[in-house]
Image (tube, helix red, strand yellow):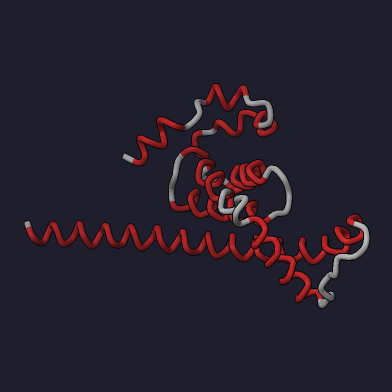
Amino acid sequence: MLRQWLRDRMPSQETLRQHRILALFGERLLDPDYWCCNRHSAAVAVAAGLFAAWLPLPMHTLVAIGLAVLFRGYLPLAIAMVWVNNPLTLAPMFYFAYRLGAWLLGTPELVFNGSLEEEALAMAVPLLTGTLLMGLSSALLGWVITRLGWRWKVQLAWKLRRKRRREQ
């Protein structure tokens, strides 16, 4: 039921082909492997989406698509995972990443009293350090959890199947 609901709402290949920004990926984006979900493609998609969600860049979705295409991930899931980062979570995520980067680099915390350009440059290195570290760690954690969860689901299905066969 969920699969059919998703299939009905997915854009057609012709729509994707005509999209101006997605033309950057060319015909490769239309490869059926990117639209088929399996253990590997789901884990890669989760990792790509979570990594892209932490980047302090616009166009997170394009970064997630690029990573999913590069590592053969399931595109719809990669796009969905980017939206962990939304207007409500953006400020706390970047604040935490900045604090982590400042702590790792040993830089003092900023007191905003100068020009905006100077403060933005002083904040950039700790922010990038923190976001890259959080992006990599959340991508790795998401990949591991997806792989383990998929394995657990398959093992549970096999146990139930064996149990049903014994009862017959």
Residue plotted at (66% across, 46% down): 60
Q: Of 39 and 78, which appears nearest the observer? A: 78
Quarter-wise, where is residue 66 in the image? top right
| Residue 104 placement: quadrant | bottom right
- At a point 70% along the width and 54% down the height, the residue shown is 55
Q: Position of residue 56 (x, y in %)?
A: 73, 53
Q: What residue is shown at x 59% (from left), y 60% (from top)? A: 139
Question: For the image shown, how many numbered marks are present on the structure?
Answer: 0
Q: Is residue 168 above or below residue 104?
A: above
Which residue is nearer to you in this view: 33 or 105? 105
User: Residue at horizontal 50%, vertical 54%?
Assistant: 43
Residue 44, how many percent across, how many down? 54, 52
* Image quadrant occupied by the N terminus: top left
96 or 44, which lies in front? 96
Please identify the quarter of the rendering in which residue 62 is found.
top right
Work out whether residue 115 or residue 132 is closer to the camera in this orientation and state it. Answer: 115
Position in image of residue 156 (x %, y %):
28, 61
Residue 151 shown left or right of residue 87 in the figure = left
In this rendering, is residue 25 above or below 87? above
Q: Is residue 151 above or below residue 66?
A: below
Instruction: Give the image location of residue 157, x and y in percent.
Output: 27, 57
Name the image quarter holding the C terminus: bottom left
Residue furthest out toward the left: 168
